[in-house]
Amino acid sequence: MHQLTLAEIARGLADKKFSSEELTKVLLARIAQLDPQLNSFISLTEDLALQQAKAADARRANGESGALLGAPIAHKDLFCTQGVRTSCGSKMLDNFKAPYDATVVAKLAAAGAVTLGKTNMDEFAMGSANESSYYGAVKNPWNLEHVPGGSSGGSAAAVAARLLPAATATDTGGSIRQPAAFTNLTGLKPTYGRVSRWGMIAYASSLDQGGPLARTAEDCAILLQGMAGFDTKDSTSIDEPVPDYSASLNDSLKGLRIGVPKEYFSAGLDPRIAELIHNSVKELEKLGAVIKEISLPNMQHAIPAYYVIAPAEASSNLSRFDGVRFGHRCENPVNLIDLYKRSRGEGFGPEVQRRIMVGAYALSAGYYDAYYLKAQKIRRLVKNDFMAAFNEVDIILGPTTPNPAWKLGAKNSDPVAAYLEDVYTITANLAGLPGLSMPAGFVDGLPVGVQLLAPYFQEGRLLNVAHQYQLNTEWHTRTPTGF
């Protein structure tokens, strides 16, 4: 049963081939057996899962149906889940049990999804490797010596290892798409505002967006259907009708204009990945797509702009964790300043501290105009490049990452080297565009992803292209040895 996709599970439950309770027990046993190798979960919610599974079976017995009714999933551990530890991968929130459900959690629970647990992540979603977690690094099931990508590496590793069919994740600069590429999954970052951020603990509020991680585009369509929608509790949520994402999966790609930016194929891209991307282009051409070279001239400025804007927002968002209201509190503070200093110094790890300091510096008097304001101007230029490109093409295609997954610890002494791995993904966050990564092949036995970007609210188009590609390729069907 663990090899079934979300779509196959929905059909199996509808045909009464198995119950949600049976499936849940199989997957919980599999997690107990295999996750010690991966460290992909922070918390398991066995009692809640079995309770939700029994309720889903009862709803089906009463004639209800739905693609997510009785389907097992997990949540990245920054989605607040009532009565369950929501840690953000940090010592700061190790003792925090959320008093309410995030909108995403509540919507999926209402649809009948079964929550197996909370997945490991880079601390406060800051990282590209899932090595900054207070609970230890997550391992890549394709090679346990390599990283699974970050910050949603726990969700990615668990789905790739067939511990469950799909999981929620978040993407601030590529944290859904990059782990998807590193673990042979399909991952979708929706348009900014498409999925509610209420109850999703913030890293950088103008960049964060929740989305699905699964093995296929068809499964991502099912999970996104349950996650998307307007939320009055989220001031950044956009009141836009949610289409039926599964309805357009089988549309023809004939005449679809796909743009390939020349800036993507620079010296920083592994030539073996470049070859796999070109192979993907040829496959889509066979399906009727028209390929055109385009230019995104300001892409070279995206990383420095992102690493000013994101830390600036993080320094503001994380100021609430002060040892007073909630979160870690130091022992025996001598005064209020000592309480703040030691609680934050003990509660936050090195990567989070680094980004808070960078952000506070960029926002400080005398440097705001030189750094933060300039970065926001570059952000507008990046968005303008995309708007010009989408006047010529329907989809933009390129590599998800410049290199395959690196070895655990390989970039720990050089944070900038890890930051540069986000070069292809962060532009979508700066512009607020939807982006998808799908499996495109292997380099040295490690998965490689191809990225698709589309205009605002065109998630259905991304899923359509990915689904048609997956009907004609078999990369996404491969399973890591031992799982």
Image (spheres, helix red, strand yellow):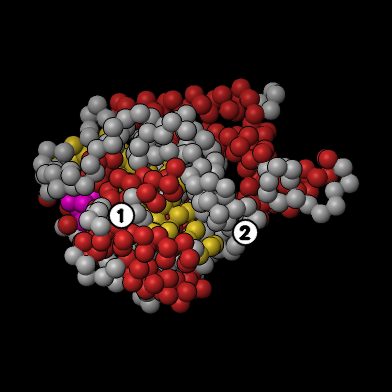
Q: Point out residue 243 in the picture as x, y percentages from the top left corner.
A: 24, 38
- Indicate yes or no whether the magenta region holds residue 468: yes
Which quarter of the figure has residue 25?
bottom left
Mark yes or no: residue 299 visible: no
Q: Point out residue 441 in the picture as x, y percentages from the top left corner.
A: 29, 61
- Indicate yes or no whether the magenta region holds residue 345: no
Q: Point out residue 152 in the picture as x, y percentages from the top left corner.
A: 47, 54
Total number of numbered discs in the rendering:
2
**Is 189 drawn above or below residue 135 in the view shown?**
above
Residue at x-position 89% and y-position 46%: 334
Residue at x-position 49% and y-position 24%: 377
Left or right of residue 381: residue 398:
left
Q: Which residue is mark 2?
A: 134
Residue type at mark 1?
Leu
Marks 1/2: CA–CA distance: 32 Å
Q: Nearer the viewer, residue 168 or 282?
A: 168
The kind of secondary structure element at disc 2 is: loop
Q: Which residue is mark 1?
A: 68
Residue at x-position 35% and y-position 37%: 229
Q: Nearer the viewer, residue 339 or 392?
A: 339
The kind of secondary structure element at disc 1 is: loop
Instruction: Give the magenta-colored segment's residue range.
Output: 465-470
Point out the image quarter for the N terminus.
bottom left
Q: Point out residue 140 in the picture as x, y percentages from the top left corner.
A: 45, 66
Q: Residues within 10 Å of mark 1 (few under 14, many from 20)?
A: many
Q: Residues within 10 Å of mark 2 (few under 14, many from 20)?
A: many
Residue furthest to the front in view is: 62
Front of the two marks 1 and 2: 1
Left or right of residue 475: residue 356:
right
Point out the image quarter for the C terminus.
bottom left
Which numbered disc covers residue 427? none
Left or right of residue 207: residue 295:
left
